[in-house]
Image (spheres, rainbow, N blue to C red):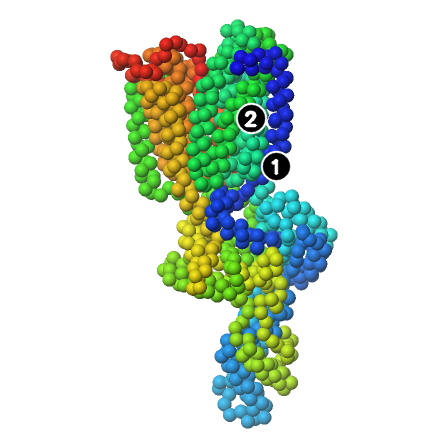
Amino acid sequence: MLDRLAALQVRRPVVPLFIAGIITLVSILLALRLEVLTGFASLLPESRPSVQELNRVAQKTAGVSTLFVVLEGGPNTPSDALRRAGDALVPAIAAVGAPWVGSVENGVHEARRFLGPRAGLYAEQKALEGLRDDIDARYAYEVNKATGALLDEDEPPPQLDAETLKKRLGLGNELGPERFPDGYYQSKDGKTLIVAVRSKVMGSDFAGGTEALQRIRAAIDKVDPASFDPQIRYGFGGDLQSGISEYKAINDDLTEVGYTGALLIAGVVFLYYLRLRTLFAMVVTIGIGVAWTFGMTELAVGHLNMATGFLFTIVAGNGINFGIIYMARYLEARRDGTPLAEAIALAHRETWLPTLTAGLAAGAAYGSLLVTEFRGFHDFGLIGGLGMVICWIATYLVLPAILTLIERVLPLDREAPGVLGRIARATSGGVAFGRPFAALVPRAPRAITLIGAGLAVVGAIATVRYIKADPMEYDLKNLRTDVSARAEEIRRTELAEQITGYVGTDGMAILVDRPEQVEPLRAALNAKRDAAPPDQKPFEKVHALQDFVPEGQDAKIPLLLEIKGKILKAERRGLIKAEDWEKIREIIPPDDLRPFGMADLPADLARAFTETDGTRGRIVYISPTATETIDDAHYLFRWANAYRRTELPDGSVVLGSGRAVIYADMWAAVIDDVPPAVIFSLVATLLVVVVAFRAGRASLAVLGALVVGVGWMMVLLVLMKVKLNFLNFIALPITFGIGADYAVNVVQRYVREGAGGALTAVRETGGAVILCSLTTTLGYLALIRSTNTAVRSLGVAAVVGELCCLFAAVIVLPAALVWIDHKPRANAPGDIPSRRALPQGGE
């Protein structure tokens, strides 16, 4: 079959290339449809109760996103100029229309108009009775004072001024002049004003969100806020802006990391071969393999997430190794004078099995992650495993045909003149990466072996202590994308949330089935909070729309109307100053004052508690404690446990989700899934090695090198104080399978050479092994350029594991073999085969 394939590729190379081209085109079109899901929830399976509840709540509450237009003036900008600019922007932005703009406001004017005359309904009945009596007393005091009948002036009753009455009626800081000057979303110094826009377009919708921003920006520019004062500037904040910015930052990051990885891999391949034709053939081949991989990803998974978004460079770094081995054997045959057709057939026959074995071993390393429930691991393993198989297929289908076409144009045996010809002849076998190690090993094989093994023992001890010290990363700031480039946007968002009081991302939403469940839920949650020690409070407060509906309205209304009559009587008497009276008129209840419910509350007041279909009163928010940080995972765990599941007195159960519960579940899934993934990877690696060497001493040599490499890896991770997180955990199981390949190839060549062939194995095969390791390592090294700290940590851990396993394979392993070869021993099955093979190696 291989001979027939080789014959077709030499005789009619356009046929396999045409087939590959069609598949590649379709794959690219599919891959372009892949979206990157940025939320933590995308890392958990849909079957998780927390994910299901999050989706249920999102469907009800996430129909609106917020965009803040932040107007900021200069030192000399009058506050009135900002207000006039805000007033002009509101109708202009509203005219943009749905779905881009659902509502727009620059203050709480509607809420104040509704709540002002009803402020007294929020006061306690005893407080209202006390106010009524104090007004009577003040009225009598002023009348007696005016008529000269006042007997005692030492303790006069409270004044009848605007501020006193507002406080006594319950119109406090929430909607008062201190918080919202004249009802505007304006800072206390008057230099910042917020225009809040609600949109039906979500920040996760990159195309729709971008268009919404463009339309709103056009409306703002048409109004020109600077025309109201030259110092006025504007910028955007809010979750619509941040969602688009985060999506763009991640895509830019993926692009930059991809380019970096591609350049590094291409550079080291060219350095090894020093032939542009070789580089071209291998880059095209691996490009096709990567395209096929992510076309299949779109069909099999449908999206990428924070764990899988950077697999492009990893698949390329691993997948190109098949081409390296094939190319090495092909070039060796051509250097020996073998004709093109025979060289292609020979490379097929002598490399397909070792490369397939290496690919299956690497695939098993990735496949070990398929046993996990954590979707970040599972999808990573699925895509990585598919990538290894697909890149192997692409190598044997495409690479020989490309080589054939290149040789028809520029035969390999045609020597170039001058300096280029001399360089080509000198480097015809590639750069000798393995020779320095072959020179080092015989100098002190025993010492190298003992030191290497000793460091592995140190690594085992360090691992135990590392685990006991709890190496997990609990600071969430160290798991996020670097936001320094978005510092100004984040500042505007925080400033706007502080001024407007909008419910931000810090509050966790719970959706009950019936509004009647809110108060029992509140009581149950508050009981959990109050039972916790003072320094372990899980949350600060429970917020609900019911908070804006006062109790006992029927009893308070007659009191308020009585108070109104007394205030009017005092005003007619001239006991209230004119400037106070203008403010007091806003809070005097109407004559037809009647009880109101949630349905009567104005939209701007009820918006955060209103579902997408208009239903009110079923959403509850839980705010974090002021003394804790939501970036501390320890606190998130405590917060999540407080509201994850609440049983009400009637036996019904209310589930909670949100960022706290999702993160807690994600971390629990990681901790549960890592042990089986590591065990599966070890078992799979052991099986591959045992099958390859029939359980002989060669198997022990490979496993011993792997143990040494992993031991060194753990020593370095401990010394570097690397914290484990939900992403760099992946480096542990995949290191076993991929790292074992290097020792496999060295031992395979040693077995073929026979006793005393360790140095030859390192010198000949070691070069290809090192090149394979370098491409894989550089694929991981590119991750260090990521702006996401979790991705960078994966790159660091994987690079450390790769290099440790490589050095164990090309230094400690051959040193041990040289040392052992000096001792007389009987050959064991699998140690020395009956024939010598031509040099092969690498993954």
Q: Which residue type carries mark 1?
A: Arg
- Picture coordinates of residue 424, whole percent (x, y): 54, 11
Is residue 288 among what the camera can see? yes
* Left or right placement of residue 780 versus residue 91 in this view: left
Instruction: Tell which of 203 and 137 is nearer to you.
Output: 203
Disc 1 versus disc 2: distance between alpha carbons? 18 Å
Q: Residue at the location (55% across, 7% down)? A: 339
- Picture coordinates of residue 735, whole percent (x, y): 41, 30
Q: Residue at the location (32% across, 42% down)? A: 468
* Left or right placement of residue 807 versus residue 509 in this view: left
Residue 529: quarter of image: bottom left
Residue 117: quarter of image: bottom right
Q: Residue 33: which numbered mark, if any?
A: 1
Q: What element does badge 1 sit on? A: loop
The answer to whether residue 108 is above or below residue 658 is below
In the displayed orientation, state which residue is furthest to the left: 824
The answer to whether residue 340 is above or below residue 157 is above
The answer to whether residue 796 is above or below residue 171 is above
Q: Residue 154: which numbered mark, if any?
A: none
Q: Which residue type carries mark 2?
A: Gly
Q: What element does badge 2 sit on? A: helix
Residue topped by disc 2: 289
The C terminus - image quarter: top left
Q: Residue at the location (45% across, 32% down)? A: 367
- Picture coordinates of residue 498, whole percent (x, y): 55, 58
**How many C-alpha atoms fall within 10 Å of the one at disc 1: few (<14), some, or many (≥20)?**
few
Residue 740: quarter of image: top left
- Picture coordinates of residue 559, whole percent (x, y): 56, 81
Q: Tag 2 or tag 1, which sits nearer the N-term?
A: 1
